[in-house]
Image: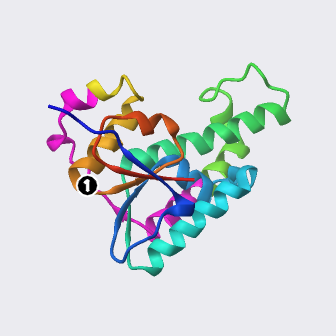
Amino acid sequence: MTQSMAKVRKIDEYVVKAGGSYFFDNNVWMFLFAPIANAHKGKQRKYASLFRSIQNMGGTIFVSSLVLSEYVNRCLRLAFNQWKEENHAYGADYKRDFRRTEDYKLALEDVKGQVIAILKCSERKPDDFNAINVDRLLESMYEGDYNDAYYARLCEMSGLKLVTDDHDMFGLMDDIEVITA
């Protein structure tokens, strides 16, 4: 069976059509909602513009529990790294040292607010793990990591366009459309 490569489209050249269905990868949510967004203002603007265009055209943006897990964990790890720098605690342990601090509690409250905001502007995508071809998923890992392969399988199975800034996903052997900055 011959498979085709993902069709990669640049945001600048992509035209949002009415009623489209999109799946945003964690890195896109990071550009839109996480404190790191100002680190890459150009990409942030592009993804924010695409986000608004999808909403204006009546499209649906999906998110999964796995994406939210990645988002929460990444944001809290960023807060941990910042805490280590500020406190010169370079050998500190995330669970043992950081989670007991007020800084952790503040970071967690921020992340909880961000997750609520993400859920307000997206639809929850059922996991559908029972329907995903795990053999194909594992085979796809030669081109990307497990989560990348899982998202590609989910988009393929559901007919969703994948919005990502993860260039590893471009090489996955899938018949999906990928939109990127």
Res. 132 visible in picture? yes
Q: Is residue 56 above or below residue 106?
A: below
Instruction: Specify whether residue 73 is painted magenta.
Output: no
Q: To which quarter of the image does residue 153 belong?
A: top left
Q: Position of residue 7 (x, y in %)?
A: 38, 48
Q: Classify residue 91 as left or right of residue 172.
A: right
Tag 1 residue = 126
Instruction: Specify whether residue 130 is painted magenta.
Output: yes
Front in this rendered view, residue 6 or 48: 6
Label 1 crowd (10 A; few <14 / some 14-19 / many >=20): few
Q: Classify residue 95 as left or right of residue 26.
A: right
Q: Position of residue 159 (x, y in %)?
A: 25, 56
Q: Is residue 146 above or below residue 76?
A: above
Q: To which quarter of the image does residue 29 belong?
A: bottom right
Front in this rendered view, residue 43 or 31: 43
Front in this rendered view, residue 105 or 57: 57
Q: How is the image coloured?
A: rainbow
Q: Classify residue 36 as left or right of residue 162.
A: right
Res. 113 visible in picture? no
Q: Main secondary structure of the magenta part?
A: helix
Callout 1 amino acid: Pro
Q: Is residue 94 above or below residue 29?
A: above
Q: Position of residue 125 (x, y in %)?
A: 30, 57
* Residue drawn at point x = 68 percent, y = 28 percent: 97
Please, what secondary structure does the residue beneath circle 1 have? loop
Q: Is residue 66 above or below residue 12?
A: above
* Residue drawn at point x = 52 percent, y = 68 percent: 51
The magenta stretch is 111-138
Front in this rendered view, residue 97 or 122: 122
Q: Could you tell me which quadrant the N terminus lies in?
A: top left
Q: Position of residue 66 (x, y in %)?
A: 39, 44
